Amino acid sequence: MDYRRIAHTDVQARLVTHGAVLIEGAKAVGKTTTGLALCASHVRLDRDAAARAAAGADPGLVLDGSSPRLIDEYQLVPGIWETVRSHIDERRAKGLFVLTGSATPDPDATSHGGAGRIARYTMRTLSQFERGRSTGRTSLAALLDGATPDSDPQRISVRETIESLVIGGWPGHADLDATSAMDANADYLDTIVHVDLPRIDGVRRDPAALTRFVRGYARNTATNASLARIATLDDKPLAPNTRTNYVRALERLFLVEDQGAWAPRLRSRVRLTVTPKRHLTEPSLAVAALGATPERLLGSEIGWTGFLFESMVVHDLRVLAGPQRAQVRYYQDNKGLEVDAIVERRDGRWIGVEVKLGVSQLEAAASNLLAMLDKLDDETRTACGALLVVVADSPTYVRPDGVIVTSLASLGP
């Protein structure tokens, strides 16, 4: 099935301003498909042995072709990055190349020399909007601009939401039933642990310990747990150096994507937290890591399910925020006040978002948002476009206190 990817427009916009775009992201999120749709010519180094051999002798041999030219799995041939950078400097043109890789970038190879020439774009799995499960009538862009959304009766039941979470947004999995998708997601994690991680840097790691670490991350989804806590599962703690090594390796594979804390200007001297919230890149992987099922998530694991739903909403907000060049952070102060997500645009416009699985928690969510707003200085308050509560099953409407209530069935770019 073809999906309407927000990344397509985002990458296209960066090709107007840069000589090349590097599409980063976890395996199987659709980087190659997006690159092929945008480019006039391509070379796929993982599939074309002859091209790979030629590029090994002279990387410039695979750069010839109509622009934009896709160089898929660029990292398989040392020197591609530097050669692309040199071509951009020589031609002094925009939109020449799209690079995609298998989410195993060498930081030393790409951390310098690309500024102003090669834009980085992080691609994620499908949002509910991209999967056709949202009307998009509650527009993130409009909310940031201060517009009030129209009422939207569209809603998805809690059970349907949980089943969608379990399946995940992988383009190749999105049409599977829950049982088949859980098997596919578990296999994905197994491949990460046993194949991809050893390959990225040649370091030998204990697969059992690494699996425990991923499970710890999953169990602490959407919390600001310390790495020490994450690395202590089944009473088998990992050494500090080991857990730091593990999280860096998982970041290189785009398996984890933590959510940083927001630092607004306050009217008081309240201290703000700095520890990030923990998220796996795709919430369905957290479910796979712990072997959960929709029945368990709706039953004995319902408390954890609320955190998973929060991670699902944060994931979709990140996708939808792409065209706005906005970041998704969270607010927490030392008085115990927390707001699940702050979406902030480069111009300072922002919205506050509370995420609740059930409508019974609406009052507490709205109270948190209003309490946070009251703590901010006048300039930051003025830049607020909306206060939003996202629940699993609700139509879209505006409360008398001005807080907007919506669901993933209505959120769009």
Image (tube, grey):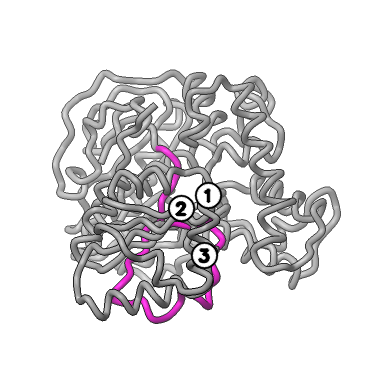
Q: Which residue is mark 3?
A: 75
Closer to us: mark 3 or mark 2? 2
Q: Amino acid at mark 3?
A: Gln
Say which element carries label 3.
helix
Q: Amino acid at mark 1?
A: Arg
Q: Which residue is mark 2?
A: 44
Which numbered marker is on residue 345?
A: none
In the displayed structure, would residue 143 be above or below residue 104? above
Q: CA distance from mark 3 to mark 2?
A: 11 Å
| In magenta segment, residue 103 | yes
| In magenta segment, residue 245 | no
Residue 118 pos. (x, y %)? 33, 70
Residue 349 pos. (x, y %)? 21, 58
Q: Amino acid at mark 2?
A: Arg
Residue 19 pos. (x, y %)? 26, 68
Residue 268 pos. (x, y %)? 34, 69
Q: Which residues are magenta?
A: 100-126
Q: Which residue is mark 1?
A: 47
Question: Relative to 32, is 94 on the left or the right?
Answer: left
Closer to us: mark 3 or mark 1? 1
Say which element carries label 2.
strand
Residue depicted at x 62% and y 27%: 297
In the displayed structure, would residue 260 be above or below residue 240? above
Question: Relative to 88, is 295 on the left or the right?
Answer: right
Q: CA distance from mark 3 to mark 1?
A: 13 Å
Occupied quadrant, residue 348: bottom left
